Image (cartoon, rainbow, N blue to C red):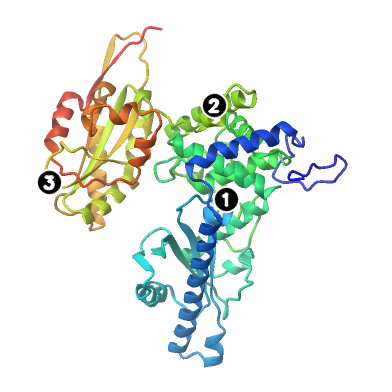
Amino acid sequence: APFPLLVSNQPQRHYGVTSPISLAPPKDIDCVQTQKLVEAMRPFGVFEDEEEQNHRLVVLSKLNSLVKEWISELGESKNLPPSAAANVGGKIFTFGSYKLGVHTKGADIDAVCVAPRHVERSDFFQSFFEKLKHQEKIKNLRAVEDAYVPVVKFEFDGIEIDLVFARLSLQTVSDNLDLGDDSRLRSLDIRCIRSLNGCRVTDEILHLVPNKENFRLTLRAIKLWAKRRGIYSNILGFLGGVSWAMLVARTCQLYPNALASTLVNKFFLVFSKWEWPNPVLLKQPEESNLNLPVWDPRVNPSDRYHVMPIITPAYPQQNSTYNVSTSTRAVMVEEFKHGLAVTNEILQGKSDWSKLFEPLNFFQKYKHYIVLTASASTEEHHLEWVGLVESKIRVLVGNLERNEFITIAHVKPQSFPGNQELCKHGYVSMWFLGIVFRKVENAESVNIDLTYVIQSFTDTVYRQANNLNVLKEGMKIEAAHVKRKHLHYFFLSGNFFLTSSDGNCLDSSRDADSRTPYNSSSLNKMSKLDTSTTEIERLAP
């Protein structure tokens, strides 16, 4: 039988920090519903075919061979005895969505290059980078050495790879090396510890779920749902892949025998009622004598301000959601409640699973928006500028949240290309933030001036760009407060983007960085129309 039922007197391993909520085995209807869930997900390209899977394996195998070859050559150049240089090993370990088995068609692969002690980090970014440069199947090669986790990014025979580096204090790195052993972290550089962390966390999550296949299918469904509802983005203060994986893993621990159709519903039940900021833990944090900094609000005052802690299960334990703010949490909790209502309907036979994956109509949801535009004069400058601006949008959300008249600032995770009418001098990307103003008692209307909030944000971005020496002539950032009825000024053809119910044209915007020429006067007209001062009409109860 495809779904083995557990005999009631069978002892069962206990998962998680509490006992399960229900050990109920699946019923026939659950198998039917799970099959229907799979069919509803298929049109979104979440499942890879066998040919694509095999292609990934071939590419990873070639990359692994390149790593071994490079480490051996490097050993010889550093005067290791030839016999030793030939056997020093080195290995590629995958992590993230690929390792969890939930990657979608065309998704990138996260991997770590683990090297023995004669290989320095500088070697990875210099001689290995050079070796990759000379491989004809490798394209778009670039290094980001100053990132929190330094990375080399490239496309290998059509597959995008993000490769980080860790140097162990071992003479050789064998193929059967266990990265789960905490002692491997002893006396390592902090960047190496962070690089290994992705792997260690992914492996630990898989180890802590009762049934890997049920976990994978549920996680695929939740990730697709989160993307469709506009709440999948670590950088913008929502949740990234590892956080969604841990929430699904916790649900699996609480319902160890449930199938995916039930688990998706229970996911929404558990997290719509969760009492944040109580942390989500997959296991009790273990002590270690390595003295690395770990998430602990009893010890670290800054950890007490985390509003939605989800704690990684591998040492050193970290909160994967430190970017979440009160606004983004409120948006996500509202979505959990909506997901619960929809899946209840589905399980009662009143709706189909396709309803769960209907996109959020973001441009109808709010009455007020802030439109943020980043422009630059060349494509290269624009890419760099957009990366920096996007990483700072959380600062704007924080500034808005602290305004006493604002209850929600909800940023849409995609950027959009600037419209054709924004004239002739460059490349433009736009982001939209929905704003909810607090109802003010006993007042007909209140004037709220957002000029200072917006100005302090743009100042912060310019200052940081200047400090990082990335500010180039022509790089601009502007923000305007716009009412819903005026949003169409910013789009290519009137209300085309705003009224799309299938979400396809919204999705097409995701990585669309415009080649549209730009002239800030259109934005200035909009700004004058409605920039910084807004009036809240008192809403009749």
Location of mark 3 (residue) = 425
The number of numbered discs placed on residues in the rendered structure image is 3
Q: Amino acid at mark 3?
A: His
Where residue 429 sits, quadrant-wise, is top left
Position in image of residue 477 (x %, y %) = 21, 42
Location of mark 1 (residue) = 312
Q: Are marks 1 and 3 in contact (CB under 8 Å)?
A: no
Mark 2, Cα crowd under 10 Å, few <14 / some 14-19 / many 20+, is: some
The disc, 1 or 3, on the residue closer to the chain's N-terminal end is: 1
Residue 189 got which mark?
none
Position in image of residue 52 (x %, y %) = 51, 58
Q: Are marks 2 and 1 in contact (CB under 8 Å)?
A: no
The residue lying at 53 percent from left, 56 percent from top is 98
| Distance Cα–Cα, label 3 vs label 2 | 45 Å
Secondary-structure class at tag 2? helix
The disc, 3 or 2, on the residue closer to the chain's N-terminal end is: 2
